[in-house]
Image (cartoon, rainbow, N blue to C red):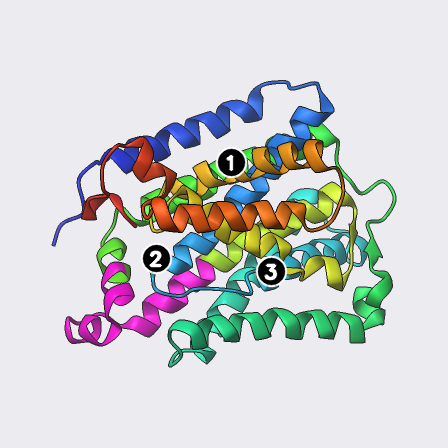
């Protein structure tokens, strides 16, 4: 079985990577525009990692577990160990990968909704642990980055966009290998995949570790950008839900879908903020309506609509 040939999704993802890379080197001076692009970059990383797990049949409802761990890892590395900006992301990626590996091994027999609930339990368990360990996490009061530890805003913005482009490129490269066929078989029927000689636990562990590293890195960027973290912020379901909506709207199990969805979600959030202000609930209502519409009328997401055809098997992850 040979690796798939270049397809429309490969061209689309290459275009997304080039776009994100170009954004990283263009000196955007308006702070608002920089903030938008930084948020897009973080959401791209989180959405790509969630989509990677979903492509193997692992639907994560508690992706905020990786996000929060990455943020706390960077905070503790900077405040306690004095680790610099760059090395803290390496630490966050290692912790995220280790957590993903443990999650895959512990939940090896869980499928579907049972795996989804397990990830949700992991996120909530970490939130409670953060509240009960004030000496380490700051408890409900949270942690601030040490004074002078934060890098220049422009550097943080550029590195985040490059990291988002790399996450898309890494996913594209991985699914250009035989891994694509393995995860597709697992997503359809793990028992049948095992009969074909595929070791589901091995591939679940690999996918979960890579996705965990990506999501934890995104959480680390959020910490360096805000300079503050607390359990209720780190392990909130808000960012995990946004990542899921972005993937479904953009095109689940596709390579370009998470990027398209991330751009749309951030743009929609800004339009919502302008129209309804800071009133709670309206943005979630709009996201919900958009999600129902996408599921009902765009089963292949915006990527399928933009390509004007139903996705072929070689174009899905």
SS of the residue under disc 3: helix
- Badge 2: residue crowd in 10 Å (few <14, some 14–19, many ≥20): many
Q: CA distance from mark 2 to mark 1?
A: 21 Å
Q: Earlier in the sequence, mark 2 or mark 1?
A: 2
Q: CA distance from mark 3 to mark 1?
A: 21 Å
Q: Quadrant of the N terminus?
A: bottom left
- Residue at 34% of width from left, 57% of height from top? 55
- In-front residue for pair 227/237: 237
C-beta proximity under 8 Å, tags 3 and 2? no
SS of the residue under disc 2: helix
* Residues in magenta, as a range: 184-210
Residue 84 in the image, given as x and y percentages of width and height: 72, 45
Q: CA distance from mark 3 to mark 2?
A: 18 Å
Residue 271 part of the magenta-drawn span: no
Q: Is residue 115 visible?
A: yes
Residue 207 part of the magenta-drawn span: yes
- In-front residue for pair 7/270: 270
Say above or below: 264 vs 49: above
């Amino acid at each position: 079985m040979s690796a798939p040939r270049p397809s429309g999704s490969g061209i689309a993802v290459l275009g997304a990577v080039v776009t994100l890379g170009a954004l990283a080197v263009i000196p955007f001076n308006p702070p608002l525009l920089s903030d938008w692009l930084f948020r897009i970059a973080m959401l791209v990383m989180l959405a790509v990692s969630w989509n990677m797990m979903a492509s193997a049949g692992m639907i994560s409802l508690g992706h905020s577990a990786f996000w929060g761990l990455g943020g706390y890892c960077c905070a503790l590395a900077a405040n306690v160990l004095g680790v610099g900006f760059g090395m803290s992301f390496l630490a966050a990626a290692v912790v995220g990968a280790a957590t993903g590996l443990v999650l895959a091994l512990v939940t090896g027999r869980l499928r579907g909704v049972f795996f989804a609930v397990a990830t949700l339990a992991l996120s909530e368990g970490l939130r409670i642990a953060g509240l009960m360990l004030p000496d380490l996490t700051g408890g409900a009061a949270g942690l601030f980055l040490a004074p002078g530890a934060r890098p220049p805003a422009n550097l943080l913005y550029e590195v985040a966009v490059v990291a988002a482009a790399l996450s898309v490129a890494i996913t594209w490269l991985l699914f250009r290998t035989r891994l694509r066929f393995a995860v597709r078989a697992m997503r359809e029927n793990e028992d049948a995949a095992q009969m074909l000689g595929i070791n589901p636990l091995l591939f679940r562990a690999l996918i979960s570790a890579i996705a965990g590293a990506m999501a934890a890195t995104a959480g680390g960027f959020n910490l360096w950008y805000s300079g503050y973290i607390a359990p209720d912020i780190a392990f909130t379901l808000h960012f995990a839900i946004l990542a899921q909506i972005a993937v479904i709207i953009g095109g689940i199990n596709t390579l370009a879908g998470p990027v398209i969805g991330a751009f749309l979600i951030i743009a929609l959030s800004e339009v919502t903020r302008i129209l309804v202000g800071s009133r709670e609930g309206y943005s979630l209502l709009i996201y919900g309506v958009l999600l129902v519409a996408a599921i009902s009328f765009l089963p292949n997401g915006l990527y399928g609509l933009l390509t004007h055809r139903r996705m072929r098997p070689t174009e899905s992850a």
